[in-house]
Amino acid sequence: MKFTEFPYERPDLEVAREVFLANIDIIKQAESVEATLEAIRSIQALQNELDSQQTLVSIRNSIDTKDEFYDKEMAFWDEKGPIMSEWATDYTRAVLNSPLRQELEAHIPATFFAMGENALRTFDPKVIPLLQKENKLTTEYAKLKASAEIEYKGKVYNIPGMAAFIESTDREERKEVSRLLWGFFDENKAEFDRIYDELVHVRSQIAKELGFKDFVELGYARMNRLDYSREDVEVYRQEILKHVVPVVAKLFKRQQERLGLEELKSYDLPIEYPNGNAKPIGTPEEIVANGVTMYHELSPETAEFIDFMVERDLLDLVTKPAKAGGGYCTYIPKYQAPFIFSNFNGTSGDIDVLTHEAGHAFQVFQSRWIETPECLWPTYESCEIHSMSMEFFAWPWMELFFADKTPKYKFSHLSSGLKFLPYGVLVDHFQHEVYEHPTMTPEERRQTWRRLEKMYLPWRDYDGNQFLEEGGFWFQQGHIFESPFYYIDYTLAQVCAFQFWKRSQVDQDPTAWNDYLKICHTGGTKSFLQIVEEAQLKSPFGEGNLEAVIASINDYLEATTEDSLKV
């Protein structure tokens, strides 16, 4: 059955609720493991049915945002979602408190229990008013950011609209666009400061009400960081400072020379080559056909996966009127079907969809055996290992997409991942400082950002822009306001993916792919460090564990000649 043939029917939630609650009662009262497991399986089947219907609506609404039917159905699910979350919480509590829990742990992944305990620890009805205030403030931030109306060359742009000019080959244009963009944040500095100040205080109060030491501890629990602490992260930060920052500084120096500039200013950083970045060749249809070839040649498992996706039309890749922006991978459990959504735009990002998003999709395809819906996907820092690593396993086929520009693509792909690490760690370090010292004033927070920025990003030269010199850059980083502590996850996964790059592309290690397959099959049944161990990778938190892989990346980049980047 093709995706367009997957039937959607709005469920009767009153009936669903009765089934849910009846099975929760059985779990609470059951005297045998068999009876408890039967009730759990009934709830899992209902979860999969409801999730499938909700996901179908979400996908079809993003494919055509003007479709009135799916627009109304989205409104239905937006309204009913929180109600169903309450059922799920009651179910989790019943399983965790079951007198048969010890026996149940032999049948249900340990991560279900660990994440369930976090879910119960991080919520109490008494903090609902504070959670509502937190949501209200994050909405205020999003609206403030979206309110930008920046006039440039006779037209008015929002922030994403201005992004098109940031990579201009005209340096004066880059400088002017940077001035206008940061001017918006400067003009609204008091509001951004106020919103974040209130967020810090309300989150700190939530943590106190729930019995946590501080919001850092609560933030880690919210993010389901099951097996590492803030102390582990501190060691990792030092490793980034020691092994990554010097290599990235050399890369930016090389970029400055390539661009023929006396000094590299902050508005020069986005442009890597005077003649532009590598772009893929071929039509969208030809790109997909080459993707099929790539996955057929990579392994029998990826061949089965890509055929499943293409035959069932589970890829919607080309931009069209009324289609939502961005890209994602999701999963429809009723049909055991991953789905990939994107908007091809003629850049190397089109190929990233066929590697990064397909990495997510391949993992969940391999994890279909997992009956516990909560454990199908791993936690955030783990699931990005699969996507980022697939980008590197696909390297031998990049000539299909970039022809003679392949060296340029590979150089950019590898170096951009490396350049991101210090910034990603900076965002995390800043939040630790903020929530460990919640009484800081807004000015002290900006000073803290600038102090840390000089440590992690010493190449940042703001060319006298006072707002940025005073530490305002982070105002644009939505994660800091909307999803606290969700950022370092990308860097942890990138470090793991780099190890797969070294093993597969440099060392030609024949076991690398099999180890990748293993963790795709594992899904979310193990924690981050357990997955790292299963993949035979080094933990990002071990002192000295980054040294070898960063050295290999440095060697590869230094061996790439400037002539090969001029194509």
Image: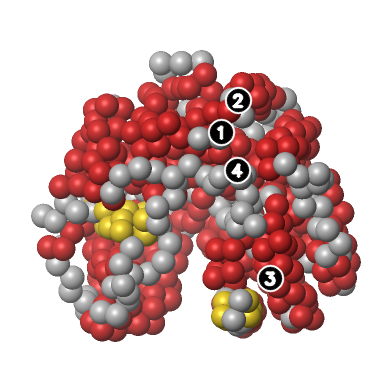
Task: Give, as a three-letter code, the residue at label 2.
Answer: Thr
Q: According to the image, label 4 marks what residue?
A: 273
Q: Which residue is mark 1?
A: 565
Q: Quadrant of residue 393?
A: top left
Gap in angstroms between the C-alphas marked 2 and 4: 13 Å
Residue type, label 4? Tyr
Q: Residues within 10 Å of mark 4 (few under 14, many from 20)?
A: some
User: Between marks 2 and 3, how big is the CA–CA gap?
Assistant: 35 Å
Q: Which residue is mark 3?
A: 181
Secondary structure under the numbered disc 2 in the rendered image: loop
Quick check: marks 1 and 4 in contact, CB under 8 Å? yes
Residue drawn at the location 36% of the way across and 56% of the way down: 344
Give the Cα separation between the discs numbered 3 and 1. Answer: 30 Å
Mark positioned earlier in the residue sequence (1 or 4):
4
Q: Disc 2 designates what residue? A: 561
Which label sits on residue 380?
Answer: none
Quadrant into which the N terminus falls: bottom left
Label 1: which secondary element: helix
